[in-house]
């Protein structure tokens, strides 16, 4: 088969979907010697250079210039998803199309697989506040229903897809996520110390690392930390790591004003973007990793932390319990008291932390890109048949 892949998110490698497609392509290259692949990449007016993995010559990248360059990125993206990729598939004689994020063309150019990581825009009201968001979300929900097969990353997401999109259960395939092999426990204290120095982090710290949109629940992390005894805060910094973007957007509140409001400037470090090579040392050096997200279709940062042997505190809701199993301390993400108590108890109990770390490393081994690629190939084969 000649398989087309919507490669839009290779231009956004820092995102979860960007990481997903990058690793999936590597896995497909290593596990599929029969099919050829065409990476269909739009060239927008302000698009960044894509981050492509090193792939064999069975993979070909085709760049398509946007027909709506003058109208801005939103129109360009919509044109690409509904028209540009269809034309590109016909031109390249694609036998099967895979759209690895929540979007599909209305007029399917070939049998089509769509990966729906989650249906957050259809479930959480704050993501439907703007009229243009509601129109776009309704459009993509309608088009995704037309896809021949759906891949999603957890049983929890599958249930939400069935409930919100009314897609028959048998068309939905659950294939979990995974993380890169670079996420592993780092024992070299010199490397960890060098990363700490780079971001101005002290020797002991509690880590939050993830996004900053409302559902990530960063404000309750700040409140929970503020409720710890002063002696604990003086011993352990709180590190809020990750790229701050879309500042000023109501869905992406800047945590720094809240830090100042709580009077914790001396205790909290907001790092900004973290280099890829610094992530594993950062996770490995943390005394506790906290991620009380309100909603996750999977929760890649939690799996990254577990693969590095971190003691994890995370939510008892959405897909997160499914991902962590018995390898994390689960809390009600709406309860500041539960988050604070879980952090405080782990800080005071080295034996409990060590037990969680051992369980985390075992649990993380259940997720691999090889398995993801093999299961994705099975979906391709079923659809082709």
Image: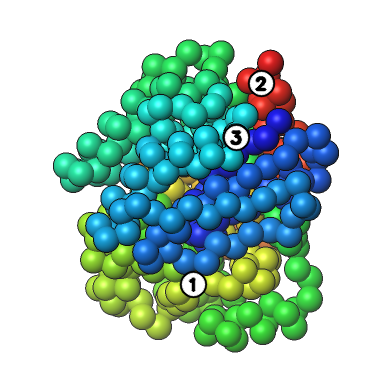
Q: Quadrant of the N terminus?
A: top right
Q: Is residue 222 visible?
A: no
Which residue is depicted at the point 38% across and 66% down?
46
Q: Position of residue 180 (x, y in %)?
A: 70, 55
Which residue is tagged 2?
384
Which residue is tagged 3?
93
Q: Is residue 112 visible?
A: yes
Which residue is depicted at the point 60% across and 34% down?
94
N-terminal of the pair, mark 2 or mark 1, is 1
Front position among marks 2 and 1: 2
Q: Of helix, strand and loop, which one carries label 1?
A: loop
Front position among marks 3 and 1: 3
CA gap, disc 3 and disc 1: 40 Å
- Residue 273, numbered circle: 1
Quadrant of the rendered image containing residue 106:
top left
Q: Nearer the viewer, residue 241 or 3?
A: 3
Answer few, some or many: residues within 10 Å of disc 2's Cα (few below 14, many 20 plus, some between 14 and 19).
Answer: few
């Amino acid at each position: 088969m000649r398989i087309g892949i919507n490669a839009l998110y290779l231009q956004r490698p820092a995102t979860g979907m960007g990481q997903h497609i990058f690793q999936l392509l590597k896995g497909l290259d290593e596990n599929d010697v029969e099919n050829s692949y065409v990476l269909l990449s739009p060239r927008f007016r302000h698009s960044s250079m894509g981050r492509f993995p090193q792939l064999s010559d069975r993979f070909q990248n085709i760049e398509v210039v946007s027909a709506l360059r003058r109208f801005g990125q939103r129109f360009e993206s919509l044109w690409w998803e509904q028209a540009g990729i269809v034309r590109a598939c016909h031109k390249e004689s694609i036998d099967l199309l895979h759209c690895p994020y929540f979007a599909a063309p209305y007029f399917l150019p070939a049998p089509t697989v769509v990966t729906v990581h989650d249906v957050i825009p259809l479930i959480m009201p704050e993501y439907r506040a703007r009229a243009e968001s509601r129109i776009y979300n309704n459009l993509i929900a309608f088009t995704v229903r037309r896809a021949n097969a759906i891949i999603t990353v957890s049983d929890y997401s599958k249930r939400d897809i069935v409930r919100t999109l009314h897609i028959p259960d048998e068309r939905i395939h659950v294939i979990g996520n995974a993380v890169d092999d670079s996420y592993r426990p780092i024992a070299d204290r010199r490397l960890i110390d060098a990363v700490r120095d780079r971001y101005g982090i002290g020797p002991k710290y509690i880590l939050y690392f993830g996004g900053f949109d409302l559902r990530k629940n960063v404000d309750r992390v700040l409140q929970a930390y503020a409720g710890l005894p002063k002696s604990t805060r003086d011993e352990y910094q709180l590190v809020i790591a990750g790229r701050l973007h879309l500042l000023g957007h109501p869905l992406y509140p800047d945590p720094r004003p809240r830090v100042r409001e709580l009077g914790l400037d001396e205790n909290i470090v907001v790092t900004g973007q973290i280099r890829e090579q610094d992530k594993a040392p950062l996770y490995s050096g943390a005394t506790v990793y906290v991620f009380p997200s309100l909603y996750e279709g999977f929760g890649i940062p939690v799996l990254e932390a577990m693969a590095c042997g971190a003691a994890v505190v995370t939510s008892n809701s959405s897909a997160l319990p499914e991902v962590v199993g018995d390898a994390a301390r689960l809390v009600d993400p709406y309860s500041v008291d539960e988050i604070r108590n879980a952090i405080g108890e782990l800080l005071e109990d080295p034996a409990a932390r060590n037990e969680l770390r051992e369980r985390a490393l075992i649990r993380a081994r259940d997720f691999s890109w090889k398995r993801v690629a093999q299961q994705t190939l099975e979906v391709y084969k079923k659809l082709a048949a």
